[in-house]
Amino acid sequence: MKPAYLNFILFIAFIYSLYLVCNQFFFFSLSYDESLFINAAISKDPITFIDKHWRGFPIMNMDYIGALKSWLYIPIFKIFGVNLLSIRLPMVFLMYFNFYLIYKIALKYFENVIAILLIILLFTDYTLIYQHKIDHGPTAIGTCLKLLAVYYISRQESLKNNILILGILLLG
């Protein structure tokens, strides 16, 4: 059972997170980390930021960075072109999906009030929002893949909590 005022606080925290996302959205130009996957996604130059490829298909953007983000952005760039919105907005949507997964996982192990308070904290964490918006790393995609694994493990009723804890530790 959750108090009614928590929904209002959650809504205010969501609006505040939107403000944090939109704050200086266009002020900063693309960083090196944000742009290194673009060439592999639009396939204009077979050399720049494509370390390994197979039959023209990028496998590694650099010797330590795979091309998953490039693959995910191919349809986005085909539809919307390459611009600041088409680069940053999908990661913002993914950030909110990550928050949803965290909420669903938290509901499994904590009371509803605790899960909502956790999401409120995430909605108001500027560092986390900034990292997802700029997607250094790529943090948003890595976080999403890890959360999907944890979510899947947490839904397995036959597994013990020790397996969940081991899975979380192995995901880093």
Image (spheres, helix red, strand yellow):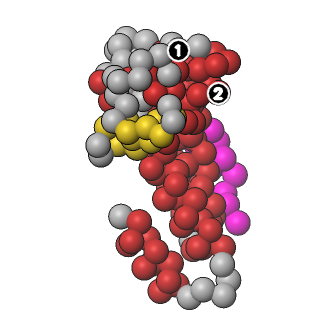
- Label 1: which secondary element: loop
19 versus 2 height, above or below:
above
Report x, y in % for residue 1. 70, 66
CA distance for labels 2 and 1: 11 Å
Q: Where is mark 2, residue-wise? A: 75
How dense is the environment of label 2, judged by Cα within 10 Å: few (below 14), some, or many (20 and up)?
few
Mainly helix, strand or loop, the magenta region? helix
Give the residue drawn at x 41%, y 66%: 171
The residue lying toward the viewer, choosing from 112 and 152, is 152
The tag on residue 82 is: 1
Q: Position of residue 65 (x, y in %)?
A: 35, 42
Compare residues 138 and 123 and report the one nearer the observer. Answer: 138
Image: 114 above or below 55: below
Q: Residue at horizontal 42%, vertical 18%?
A: 45
The answer to the question of whether label 2 and label 1 lie on touching residues, with beta carbons closer than 8 A, is no
Quadrant occupied by the C terminus: bottom left
Tell me residue 27's x, y (percent).
37, 11
Magenta includes 3? yes
**In the rendered image, which quarter is residue 2 located in?**
bottom right
Residues rendered magenta in the picture: 1-11
- Identify which residue is drawn at 64% across, 19% down: 78
